Image: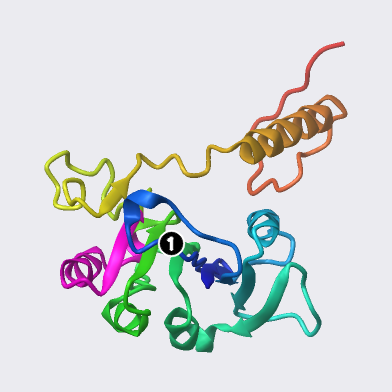
Amino acid sequence: HALELGAPRVFRALHHHRDPTRGAVLAGRNSSRTAPADLVAPERRLAAFDVTVTGLRRHPPSGPVPPFAAVYTADRLLDCVADADSVIIAASHQSGQPPLVDDTVLRAMRPGAWLVNIARGALLDAEAALAHLDTGHLAGIGLDVFASEPYPADGSLLDHPRIVATAHTASLTSDYFAAASRRLGDALGAYLNHQPPAGLLSSPIHTSHLSD
């Protein structure tokens, strides 16, 4: 079972072999995720492996959202993590917000589950996660983000044999570069037509246009 919590998505979970060196077995497993209905590319990939994908959102849609088998409200968080074989944190974070995945959530996770954080380091209580890893409650942890970056080279999260860490590069996928290229092209086209780009958050004090 795979679970993703996001912004509004929150987690994704995938079933893995008990031996972490043997890779992942996806066929016939379940997956849970909380995410906007238009952010479903990873879930479509999971569905191709016969993974059942479940969503968790603040405001679930009234109808089905393929490839999700079901979408639940955020108050079902503890129930959802208890049913997931692996959990991937993929949520947004606001300054001052407490960890989304704290000791309570970690305790609710299925024994032997995997935990991955590709969102923001502050969403995870890393010390609590490390403690659950050391007791064997968690099978392994994957980290692409840390509460403080750059993370110190001698930090306890980097030398653990059951933690895989990367340097904030999880978003650098072919899908990301394709989408970024499209948005850049659209923004340049809007600029040449003297129009603001889509998604503009602020306007410059002084503007200029390309000369003919």
Vertical order, 78 against 186 (above or below): below
What residue does disc 1 label?
Answer: 16
Segment colored magenta: 122-142
Marks counted in the figure total 1
Identify whether 136 is placed above or below 188: below
- Asked which quadrant contains residue 108, the reply is bottom left
- Can the viewer see residue 54 in this picture? yes
Q: Nearer the viewer, residue 96 or 130?
A: 130
Q: Position of residue 92 (x, y in %)?
A: 49, 62
Task: Please determine whether, in this image, residue 180 is positioned above or below residue 10.
Answer: above
Residue 124: percent from left, percent from top: 33, 66
> Residue at left 29%, top 69%?
138
Q: Is residue 46 magenta?
A: no
Q: How many residues crowd mark 1 within 10 Å: few (<14), some (14–19), many (20+)?
A: many
Placement of 167 over or under 27, stated as above or below: above
Question: Residue at coordinates 40% horizontally, 58% vertically from top-left?
Answer: 117
Q: What amino acid type should be assigned to the residue bearing mark 1? A: His
